């Protein structure tokens, strides 16, 4: 239906006849001459409808409105002097229309395309209209290129693409499962996969050696800017490998994806242990593009004559006192603003926030009276304070302090405008603990199939649960977790021991993971892998504020599709076939 895309119409075609097709971006009637900006997937080209050239085309153009679908045929000519549009790749030429066809009309648009102020609910209801914008098209063009780069790179590295089931068994992997009732098996349910974790491990048992998949995954969890109920990940698994092998493949993969999409990034990425990341940044996914880091000062505060601080400092294993230096903060923030920072950290459980100001005559602030001159000097030295700096202090339970001081660090960086916008800073987080306590219960920090670390004697000791390390690793980019993985448990006895520590009985383990435990008895090789969030990669590469922008038809924060009105009520006949009776909620 066309001879050229709009972007191909340039000076080389002057004097030649072309046919283009697309949507009307704008129409202007200049008293006889009608100008139409026609847009297709890549670019806009200007059409000129002149009654002197074609009365029929001009008459049709009088009826044209925004977003009509047109096919136009005409000759390309150079625009007049001073009339060129440098913003367009087609801006030096225009098409004098000889034949114009309205293929379809459009009713008035519910919003102006490209208007950033439009309510998100309206955008999601008419998502197909927002996809018409050049911004949206460029995002999905980038996504396609990134996906192809991932496939090609993994193919070159000897990986085999294998699809794993979507209808599978419900297993506890951290989030809630989406359940699918079975019509044939009354009262029984499939689950949509939270990840292909168990199946890719079984592929390693099956001898596939290197597997990958661009996998659709589902999690019924509370949503945030970087979460959706269904998402896509680049899933990888390898046999006879260690952590370094996985990291090497991952760096090659990520480097290929970013460079193929036009970004310059390093071949190798920095590394931080989980402990260092938490102690310095208060997060296991730190944004390392800026230098605000925490310093441990618990030993200095132990010597102060303030009983609140000195008592906290006595328990160095479970408590922390952290200092966070803000260079030149005394000249950036007023005392009123610094007092407001206490309100910010209180939202995350803090009982307070102390601070010192570095003046020419030394440290000033309400806390200085509790310290000796020597200890104040040590604070200055340890925090590397200069005149004009401010240092903030958080004290209390280790987990709580690291959390709110980490959040405070990010808050300060955004207020100060010190976060580079056009910089990619990758960092590996390694040496994760195997378990963590939450509400008095033991849970796996990554997942229960992660291999625990061996001790100096080459043995795995399960005596002190909180001291058990794991062979797990995450890749973080600009404060966002891009992916995570681990070396897996490949022996049935170790897997059973981990289940017991997690409070999973032999009966429950057999019921939920019996197929995996059985497979591990048949010569399962050492293996490991990683999964990268494709949506998050594209979000960061495209500079989008949410992964909703990089998913063609996303859900709302309540997991609703406003476009199709899903989830929705189904008729009683369907429910009867599935052996389901709906209990209606009664509201007063």
Image (cartoon, rainbow, N blue to C red):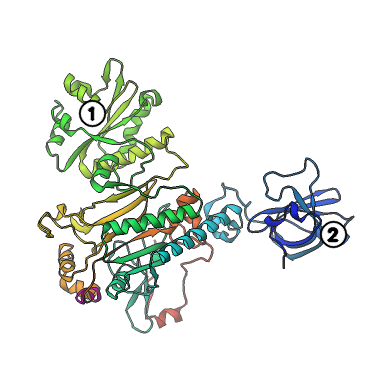
Q: Position of residue 275 (x, y in %)?
A: 23, 46
Question: In which quadrant will I find the C terminus?
Answer: bottom left
Q: Which quarter of the picture shows residue 165?
A: bottom left
Q: Is residue 513 visible?
A: yes
**Residue occupied by mark 1:** 382
Q: Is residue 122 visible?
A: no
Question: In which quadrant will I find the N terminus?
Answer: bottom right
Q: Secondary structure at mark 2?
A: helix
Q: Position of residue 306 (x, y in %)?
A: 16, 27
**Residue ranking furthest to the top:** 361
Residue 516 part of the magenta segment: yes
Residue at the spot x=77%, y=58% of the render?
64
Q: Is residue 566 left or right of residue 441?
A: right
Q: Position of residue 266 (x, y in %)?
A: 40, 47
Using the numbered discs, state the Cα–Cα distance from disc 2 to disc 1 in whole angstroms: 79 Å
Residue at the spot x=87%, y=59% of the render?
54
* Tag of residue 59: 2
Q: Earlier in the sequence, mark 2 or mark 1?
A: 2
Residue 529 part of the magenta segment: no
Q: Give the answer, above or below, for where 25 lies relative to 379.
A: below
**Residue ranking furthest to the right:** 52
Residue at the spot x=53%, y=55% of the render?
139
Magenta-colored span:
515-522
**Residue ranking furthest to the bottom:** 184
């Amino acid at each position: 239906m066309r001879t050229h895309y709009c972007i191909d119409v340039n000076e080389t075609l002057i004097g030649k006849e072309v046919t283009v097709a697309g949507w009307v971006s704008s129409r202007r009637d200049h008293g006889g001459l009608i100008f139409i900006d026609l847009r297709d997937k890549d670019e806009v080209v200007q059409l000129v409808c002149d009654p002197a050239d074609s009365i029929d085309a001009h008459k049709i153009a009088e009826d044209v409105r925004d977003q009509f679908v047109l096919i136009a045929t005409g000759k390309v000519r150079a625009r007049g002097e001073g009339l060129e549009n440098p913003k367009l790749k087609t801006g030096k030429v225009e098409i004098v229309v000889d034949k114009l066809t309205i293929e379809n009309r459009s009713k008035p648009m519910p919003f102006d395309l490209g208007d950033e102020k439009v309510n998100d609910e309206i955008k999601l209801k008419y998502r197909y209209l927002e996809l018409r914008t050049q911004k949206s098209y460029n995002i999905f063009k980038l996504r396609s290129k990134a996906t192809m780069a991932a496939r090609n790179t993994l193919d070159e590295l000897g990986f085999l693409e294998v699809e794993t089931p979507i209808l599978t068994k419900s297993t506890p992997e951290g989030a809630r499962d989406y359940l699918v009732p079975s019509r044939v098996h009354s009262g029984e349910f499939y689950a949509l996969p939270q990840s292909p974790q168990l199946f890719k491990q079984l592929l390693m048992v099956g001898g596939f050696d290197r597997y990958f998949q661009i996998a659709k995954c589902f999690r019924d969890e509370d949503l945030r800017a970087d979460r959706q109920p269904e998402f896509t990940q680049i899933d990888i698994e390898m046999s006879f490998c260690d952590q370094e092998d996985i990291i090497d493949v991952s760096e090659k993969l990520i480097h290929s994806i970013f460079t193929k999409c036009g970004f310059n990034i390093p071949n190798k990425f920095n590394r931080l242990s989980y402990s260092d990341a938490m102690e310095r940044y208060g997060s296991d996914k730190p944004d390392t593009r800026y230098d605000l880091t925490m310093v441990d000062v618990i030993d200095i505060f132990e010597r102060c004559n303030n009983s609140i601080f000195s008592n906290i400092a006595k328990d160095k294993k479970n408590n922390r006192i952290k200092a966070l230096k803000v260079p030149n903060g005394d000249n950036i923030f007023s005392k009123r603003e610094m007092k407001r920072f206490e309100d910010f950290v209180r939202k995350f459980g803090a009982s307070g926030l102390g601070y010192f100001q570095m003046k020419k005559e030394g440290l000033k602030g309400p806390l200085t009276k509790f310290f000796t001159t020597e200890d104040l000097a040590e604070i200055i030295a340890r925090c590397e304070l200069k005149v004009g700096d401010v240092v903030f202090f958080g004290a209390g339970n280790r987990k709580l302090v690291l959390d709110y001081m980490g959040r405070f660090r990010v808050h300060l960086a955004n207020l100060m405008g010190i976060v580079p916008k056009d910089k990619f800073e990758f960092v590996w987080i390694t040496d994760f603990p195997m378990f963590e306590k939450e509400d008095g219960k033991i849970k796996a920090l990554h997942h229960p199939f992660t291999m625990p670390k061996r001790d100096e004697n080459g043995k795995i000791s399960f005596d002190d649960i909180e001291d058990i390390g794991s062979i797990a690793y995450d890749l973080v980019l600009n404060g966002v977790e891009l992916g995570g993985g681990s070396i897996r448990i490949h022996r049935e006895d170790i897997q059973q021991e981990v289940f017991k520590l997690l409070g999973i009985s032999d009966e429950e383990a057999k019921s939920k993971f019996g197929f995996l435990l059985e497979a591990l008895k048949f010569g399962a090789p050492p293996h490991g892998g990683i999964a990268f969030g494709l949506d998050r990669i594209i979000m960061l590469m495209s500079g989008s504020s949410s992964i909703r922008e990089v998913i063609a038809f996303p859900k709302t924060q309540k997991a609703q599709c406003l476009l199709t009105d899903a989830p929705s009520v189904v008729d009683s006949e369907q429910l009867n076939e599935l052996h389901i009776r709906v209990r209606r909620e009664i509201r007063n």
